[in-house]
Amino acid sequence: MKLLQKLLAATSIFAATAAIAGPPVTVTFKNNNTTTDATYRIVTTNESSTYANASPKPATTVSKLGSNSYAVTSLISPDVNYANVRYKIGSKECVFGTTFVNALQPGGYKIPKWTKTATGSGGAICTATITSTNLTTYA
């Protein structure tokens, strides 16, 4: 009986954790290429988690001069969120990332901190900008 109570307690903790979510980040990918569509790709586990936490799901193809937007909400903590996405246009590829941490400071207050990355390969020029809780990416 005690084992059953422990299992129920553990299940309750996991269920409560799943309900906690960080602040959503809206990802907007803009394909600035005038001749070729961009392809959304998943290579890493962080990219896979981003896809799983995205709503709606990212489009697999973004037409030339087109864009695609979606929200990503991490279930790690109400004070943490991240998004990692990858797009390919021909032999050029862009990998974008952002993290959000609401860092607890002495005195009990929190300071929100965003980071961003944009890494290109194959001659790609990639740019990421953050406005409020939105990550805008360009390829």
Image (cartoon, rainbow, N blue to C red):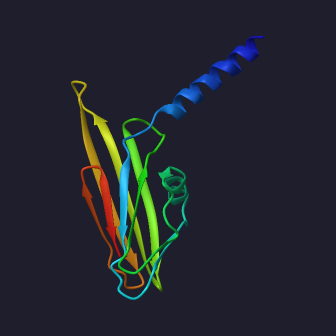
Question: Residue 51's x, y, as percent?
Answer: 52, 56
Question: Residue 21's x, y, as percent?
Answer: 44, 37
Q: Is residue 80 above or below residue 115?
A: above
Question: Which quadrant of the rendered structure holds the N terminus?
Answer: top right
Question: Residue 32's x, y, as percent?
Answer: 33, 79
Question: Residue 130's x, y, as percent?
Answer: 26, 57
- The residue sitting at 46% across, 68% down in the picture is 86
Q: Is residue 126 left or right of residue 87?
A: left
Q: Is residue 37 above or below residue 55?
A: below
Question: Which quadrant of the rendered structure holds the C terminus?
Answer: bottom left
Which residue, as the protein is rendered here, is positioned at the far right? 1
Which residue, as the protein is rendered here, is positioned at the far top? 1
Q: Quadrant of residue 121?
A: bottom left
Q: Is residue 138 left or right of residue 41?
A: left
Which residue, as the protein is rendered here, is positioned at the far bottom? 35
Q: Between residue 12 and residue 111, name the one nearer to us.
A: 12
Q: Between residue 28 and residue 80, name the one nearer to us.
A: 28
Q: Is residue 106 left or right of residue 4?
A: left
Q: Quadrant of residue 4?
A: top right
Q: Is residue 113 left or right of residue 79?
A: left
- The residue sitting at 33% across, 43% down in the picture is 101
Q: Is residue 112 above or below residue 63?
A: above
- The residue sitting at 47% across, 85% down in the picture is 91
